Image (cartoon, grey):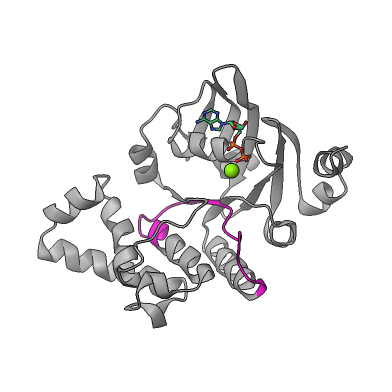
């Protein structure tokens, strides 16, 4: 049954900023190994929803359960440690550091402490272990040939993939990706889609915000559509494609 399989259950989650209702009692589920798209016009509340799930923002109402445990109201680092990894809308890499070291920063973060503090505390044994784990994730995402390259020398598509490798170091069960395909070339989008499918085949759940409709329609198992903070539709790509409410929202109807 869908209930037993749901990794993430978002139940009537709400977020207000002063008088603005940014997320208005939104509910959806993500099952194990499922790729779910969160779409909608600018300002719909997609990033805010992500921030509620990751714990970057505190909800004003509703509940979020992850792997059977209530997580809303818990600190972001606890939620990350429980198995929710994320990437951000804008690439956050250290351009002069190597690909390996950039990814290793994600492995350091697994401990839940600040990057620099945890690096200072590491002994040589821990450091070797973390670098080995980082190298494994770099290979996993297909950047093995670029291990020692400066991260800033990579194409944008590869930098996005690097960020995914960094998130994978924390061994997440659910990945939150905010606009992973934005600004990518066609080939890069295809490579990214292949990687995300591979991760999902390995059992990873993925929730992504994305504006590229071709990308999202070809990749996802189901979609949640938001407008003005409200969930206006939910369904398979085929259902969403032909949903009149969605067409109206996108065409300004
Ligand atoms: P989306 O990601 O779908 O474009 P957001 O979640 O970023 O939308 O924003 C939803 C609404 O909430 C917008 O009207 C935005 O201006 C508002 N908003 C987002 N974050 C804040 C904040 N920290 N303070 C006040 N208003 C915010
Ligand atoms: Mg956004």
Q: Is residue 19 magenta?
A: no
Q: Name the residue: 32% across, 71% down.
A: 100
Query: Does 237 sit above or below residue 53?
Result: below
Q: Nearer the viewer, residue 122 or 153?
A: 153
Lateral position of residue 127 relative to residue 230, left or right:
left
- In percent of width and height, residue 250 lies at 80, 44
Of the 4 image quadrants, the one containing the N terminus is top right
Residue that extends furthest to the top in the rendered view of this protein = 19
Q: How many marks?
A: 0
Q: Nearer the viewer, residue 216 or 6?
A: 216
- In percent of width and height, residue 70 lies at 45, 30
Q: Nearer the viewer, residue 248 or 174?
A: 248
**Residue 2 lies in what quarter of the image?**
top right
Whether residue 1 is visible to the viewer of this picture, yes or no, is no
- In percent of width and height, residue 155 lies at 50, 73
Lateral position of residue 134 relative to residue 35, left or right:
left
Q: Name the residue: 52% across, 31% down.
A: 64
Lateral position of residue 78 relative to residue 120, left or right:
right
- The span shown in magenta is 166-186
Query: Does 251 sit above or below residue 22?
Result: below
- In percent of width and height, residue 153 lies at 41, 75
Residue that extends furthest to the bottom in the rendered view of this protein = 145
> Ligand 1 is in which quadrant of the figure?
top right
Of the 4 image quadrants, the one containing the C terminus is top right
Q: Name the residue: 30% across, 68% down.
A: 97
Lateral position of residue 176 relative to residue 137, left or right:
right
**Residue 151 lies in what quarter of the image?**
bottom left
Q: Is residue 177 magenta?
A: yes
């Amino acid at each position: 049954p869908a209930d037993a399989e749901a990794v993430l259950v978002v139940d009537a989650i709400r977020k207000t900023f002063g008088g603005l209702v940014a997320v208005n009692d939104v509910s959806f589920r993500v099952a194990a190994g499922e790729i779910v798209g969160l779409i909608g016009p600018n300002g719909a509340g997609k990033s805010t929803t992500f921030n509620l799930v990751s714990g970057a923002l505190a909800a004003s109402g509703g509940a979020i359960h992850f792997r059977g445990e209530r997580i809303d109201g818990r600190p972001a680092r606890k939620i990350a440690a429980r198995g929710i990894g994320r990437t951000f809308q804008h690439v956050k890499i250290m351009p002069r550091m190597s690909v390996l070291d950039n990814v290793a920063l994600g492995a350091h973060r697994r401990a839940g402490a600040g990057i620099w503090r945890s690096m200072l505390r590491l002994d040589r044994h821990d450091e070797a272990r973390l670098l080995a784990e980082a190298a494994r994730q770099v290979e996993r995402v297909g950047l093995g040939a670029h291990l020692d390259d400066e991260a800033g020398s990579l194409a944008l598509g590869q930098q996005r993939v690097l960020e995914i490798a960094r998130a994978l170091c924390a061994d997440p069960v659910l990945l939150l990706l905010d606009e992973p395909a934005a600004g990518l070339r066609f080939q890069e989008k295809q490579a990214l889609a292949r990687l995300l499918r591979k991760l999902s085949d390995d059992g990873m759940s993925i929730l992504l915000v994305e504006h590229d409709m071709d990308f999202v329609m070809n990749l996802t198992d189901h979609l949640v559509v938001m407008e003005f903070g409200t969930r206006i539709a939910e369904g398979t790509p085929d259902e969403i494609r032909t949903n009149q409410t969605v067409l109206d929202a996108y065409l300004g109807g």
